Image (cartoon, grey):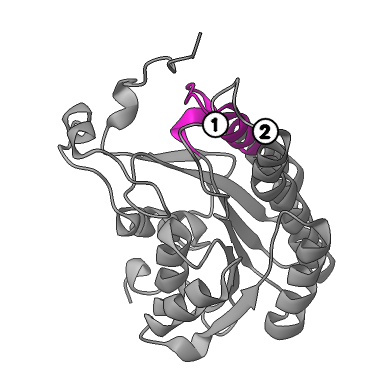
Amino acid sequence: MSLFSTPFDPAHDTALVTGAGNGIGRAIALGLVGEGVRTMFADVSAERVTAAIGASKTPELAVPWVGDLAKLEACDELLASAHAVLGDVTHFVHSASPPRREADHALAVDRRTWQEMHAVNLDAGFHLARGIATRLIAAKRPGSFLFLTSLHAGTPRNLPHYSTAKAGMAMLVKELAKTFGRRNIRVNALVPGAIAAGGFVADASLAKHIPLGRLGEANDLVPMALAVLSNKLSAYVTGAAFVVDGGLSLTNWFEAPVLED
C-alpha cells in the first residue's frame, strides 16, 4: 500500500481545527474528515460551522463547537468539549483569527482590536496547544500541531496588531516544537500568501506580484497542511514553517499607510 494513500490512521487519529467555519481553517478541516479523521470544527459562528460541516462528504466525522476564543474561559470549554467527545486530540490546527481592516494602522487601531487579535491568535493558540499536549504526554501518545501564521510575521503589513500577533505565533511554534519534541509531539507553521478566503479580499492586480500568476485559494494549502500534519509523511519534521504563497514572498508590494495631517 502506498504511503500517500494512508497519511492518517482513522482508527486512532482525531483532530481539532479552530477557525473551521471559513477560509483556510474550513478547507483543512474538510480535508481531515475527507481522510477519515474525526474532527472538531471550532468557530465563533454557528452558521459558518453548520455550513462547513454540510459541505463535507463525511459529515458524520465532523463535530461542531461554537465559541469566542478571545475569551480564556472559551478555550477551557473547547478543550473540555474536545476531550469529552474525541478523547485524546492527536492533531491540532490553529487557524482562528479575527477579521482585519485596512484602516487599523499604527495610529488608528484601538486597544480592544489589538487585544482581541493577540488573544485569538497567540493566547488561545498557546493555551489550546498546551492543554492538548499535556493530555497526549500523560497518555504517551504522539501528536502533530499546525499553526497558521503569515508572511507578515516577518514583513510589515501596516496592521501592527496582526503582524505582531503572527510574529508571536511564529516563535511560539519554535518554542513548543523544542519543548514537546522529546515527547513525540511535532509543531509546525503553515505560512499562507494572498489567499482569497476567510474575509480577505485582494485586488486582482495583486496577481502581477505573484510568480505563479494568480491569487491563492484556501484549497491550495490543504495538501501541504495534511502532509505536514501526517505523522507518516512528516515524522521527522518539527519547528518548521512552510510557505504556500505562489512565490509572493519574493517581493513586498505594500506602501506605507497614508496618514492625515
Residue occupying the point 34% across, 27% down: 249
Q: Amino acid at mark 2?
A: Asp
What residue did someone put label 2 on?
110
Task: Answer whether labels 1 and 2 touch (C-beta < 8 Å).
Answer: yes
Q: Amino acid at mark 1?
A: Asp
The residue at which mark 1 appears reads as: 104
Q: Quadrant of residue 86?
A: bottom right
Exactly how many numbered labels are in the figure? 2
Residue 52 horizontal side relative to residue 141, left or right: left
Q: Residue furthest front?
A: 261
Q: Is residue 70 above or below residue 57?
A: above
Q: Residue furthest top?
A: 261
Comparing 189 with 47, the one in front is: 47
User: Which x, y percent locates residue 257?
Assistant: 44, 18
What secondary structure is found at the residue carrying circle 1?
loop
Looking at the picture, tell me which residue is in the foreground, 259 or 190.
Answer: 259
Q: Residue 213 at x, y = what percent?
A: 15, 37
Q: Where is residue 45 drawn, in percent x and y?
A: 56, 69
143 versus 124 height, above or below: below
Q: Give the residues in magenta.
A: 150-169
For image coordinates 76% across by 83% down, the residue present is: 84
Q: Secondary structure at mark 2?
A: loop
Please name the residue shown 51% across and 8% down the image.
261
| Category of crowding for the residue at label 1, using alpha-carbon neighbours closer than 10 angstroms: few (below 14), some (14–19), many (at least 20) | some
Answer above or below: position of 116 versus 257.
below
Q: Which mark is residue 181?
A: none
Binning the other alpha carbons within 10 Å of mark 2 as few (below 14), some (14 to 19) or many (20 upward) gives few
